[in-house]
Amino acid sequence: MNDKIKETEDNILRYLYENRLKSPQSLAKIRYAANLEEDRVDKKILKASLESLISKNFIKKQENRGNYKIEDEAVEYVEKIL
């Protein structure tokens, strides 16, 4: 499961990086971009991935709407690995 979480984190970062100049992205768009379903297991993976990225200060969740935006640190990280 840890491998799936890491893969999902990478997919989320890549998606948010590609859309960094747009408005913060919704959970539904992120789930779709990370190739996750609406089932219980994928929801756990998505939640764990988002929490991990937030704890690393790679993404930020908007308080009022619950959408996600990539942080500058993550932009630098993604540009290094591309």
Image (spheres, rainbow, N blue to C red):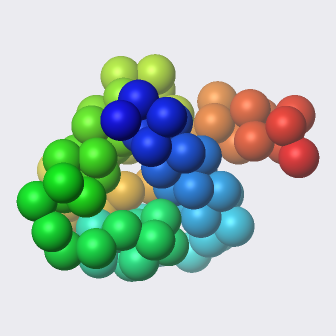
Q: Quadrant of residue 69?
A: bottom left
The answer to whether residue 31 of the structure is visible from this angle is: yes
User: Is residue 70 in view from this perspective?
Assistant: no
Tell how many labels.
0
Query: Which residue sits at x=59%, y=64%?
Result: 15
Quadrant of the rendering where the N terminus is positioned? top left
Q: Position of residue 8 (x, y in %)?
A: 48, 50
Residue 70: percent from left, percent from top? 53, 49
**Camera-nearest residue between 66 and 11:** 11
Percent position (x, y) of residue 68? 37, 57
Asked if residue 23 is positioned above or below residue 49 in the image, the reply reads below
Instruction: Residue 81 in the image: state x and y as whole percent.
Output: 85, 37
Seen in the picture, residue 64 relative to 6 is either above or below; the reply is below
Q: Residue at x 46, y 22 (%)?
A: 56
In the rendered view, does 3 fall on the left or right side of 67?
right
Q: Residue at x 41, y 39 (%)?
A: 5
Q: Left or right of 80: which side holds 57?
A: left
